Amino acid sequence: MSEVRFTDQHEWVRVDGDEATIGITKYAAEQLGDVVFVELPEAGRKVGAGGEAAVVESVKAASEVYAPVGGEVTASNPDLTADPAKVNVDPEGDGWFFKLKLADKAEFAKLMTADQYAEFVKGL
Amino acid sequence: MADPNDTLQKTPLHALHVSLGAKMVPFCGYDMPVQYPAGILKEHLHTRDKAGLFDVSHMGQAFLSGADPARALERLTPADVVGLKPGMQRYGLLLNDEGTIKDDFMFSKLVGEDALYLVVNAGTKEADFAYIAAKLKGVAALEPRPDRALLALQGPAAAAVLERHSHGIDKLTFMKVTRCIVAGAPAILSRSGYTGEDGFEISIEAIHAERVARALLDEPEVLPIGLGARDSLRLEAGLCLYGHDIDETTDPAEANLVWSIAKRRKLDKDFPAAEKIMDRVFNGTPRKRVGILTDGRAPAREGADIADKSGKVIGKITSGGFGPTLNAPVAMGYIDSAFAADGTEVDLMVRGKPLPAKVAPMPFVPHRYRRAI
């Protein structure tokens, strides 16, 4: 069973066993506008929770994407390099950024649930 | 705490922008649309494909009158103002006493009128108007016109669209200007713009602005376009953005805007810091404004360092982003003149990493102005 949680930096993370898949939320994609470039971490790179892991660029501006949880990167989404607009089309599905091997499940438990995140966005 | 947006000014089209679903942002003291629901990418491509309507009412409009306002204005700009024929518009640089660029602006001579019509940048208008009024005191009088709105209709379909609302406008070729009626409103209409496309700028009284804008937006070819696409369009067209690509630390020689200095003015050297500027025109400047194209898809933004292939910093990006028409990143910036030749290989430093790039001629997307035959 997988579970999805969210950060106040508008990343989502889905955990399946000890594998975490990370992307940016629909809200973040809408705020950014048309995505034209993504820079993704290479497999094998270790990132800490809250550390800079990827970059997403829209026509307007560049934004950092932080790792919601720490671990070792196992894969990045190869489709995004060729078709960065996927981030706008399906941010919380096909537009995922990277996967990592979760180092500490307790970090995941500290993140917002879907309901908490929806409340958080409402307040912005 | 007071809402900071309360202090922002609104253009006469503010309510229209909000009703169209625009994302509003503070810009030069105004609450302005950065994009509409279509988004910057689509708005940009639509303008190059059909036509886009821009609200540029935040820009400063004014009339300069006096015994000889053209002669007076030449004290502050190296452009040929005196030689401007009635019915024509021209681009000029407003210089300070040191010969650096206080603003860039458009000036027009309307047929049968003595006063010159000026349009200056939004962010500098207060300072420009104060400067012009003070410098020309007793010689010419400046009358700002905050009661006027300014619309820009840009793109290959602009002329066909406007013809439906202002009969006979196609005889107005690039950089011509006339008073006429647009959608029932008295207008100052010029065939010019800031996108590199054919198009028009339409100055009307604020009270008519929303009705004229709605009439143009009702045409099937026209979409509303925000400031985001305005910036990417002008960057692809190689046009300077004041406060970024030119400012009071740059002069016409290094900014590569010597074409805006008239031949007569070069000979007479009768504009601010003319000796200094002409010396720099003939003997060169340490740095120059150039266009830059990167090899990959990662855009370099304003402020990124330009480095030579050994890693030495040789310049800085002043405008950079993604060019939707080129489908590639585009940038301009200032570079050590030894590296300013087209094709020179450089690196742009983005997040600490070098992006291979080349100095490239501008415009990046060819201009498609409707010039007189």
Image (spheres, rainbow, N blue to C red):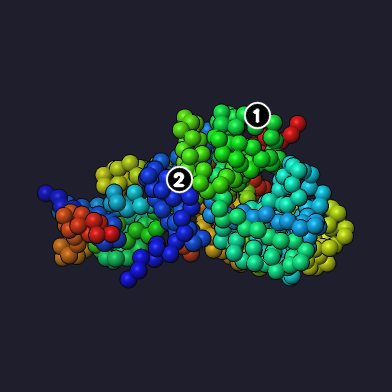
Residue A112 falls in which quadrant of the image? bottom left
Residue at the location (62% across, 58% down)? B144
Q: Is residue A80 left or right of residue B155?
A: left
Q: Could you say where residue B219 lies in the image, as x and y percent from the top left? A: 48, 31
Q: Could you say where residue A113 lies in the image, as x and y percent from the top left? A: 16, 57
* Residue type, mark 1 in image: Gly
Q: Is residue B237 left or right of residue B329?
A: right
**Which disc, if any, is residue B323?**
none
Vertical placement of residue B319 versus B223, above or below: below
Q: Is residue B315 left or right of residue B68?
A: left
Q: Could you say where residue B85 lies in the image, as x and y percent from the top left? A: 79, 44
Vertical placement of residue B150 versus B241, above or below: above
Residue at the location (84% across, 53% down)? B263
In this view of the protein, can residue B301 be seen by the observer? yes
Quarter holding the C terminus of chain B? top right
> In this orientation, which residue lies closer to the viewer: A55 or B238?
B238
The numbered mark 1 sits on a residue in which chain?
B
Earlier residue among tags 2 and 1: 2
Instruction: Name the mark nearer the viewer: 2 or 1.
Output: 1
Identify the residue position indicated by label 2 in the image. Answer: B40
> In this orientation, which residue lies closer to the viewer: A20 or B174?
B174
Quarter holding the N terminus of chain B? bottom left
Q: Could you say where residue B150 lies in the image, as x and y percent from the top left? A: 56, 47
Identify the residue position indicated by label 1 in the image. Answer: B168
Looking at the picture, do discs 2 and 1 lie on one chain?
yes
Residue at the location (56% across, 47% down)? B205
* Residue type, mark 2 in image: Ile
The numbered mark 2 sits on a residue in which chain?
B
Question: Circle 1 — which element?
Answer: loop
Residue A40 falls in which quadrant of the image? bottom left
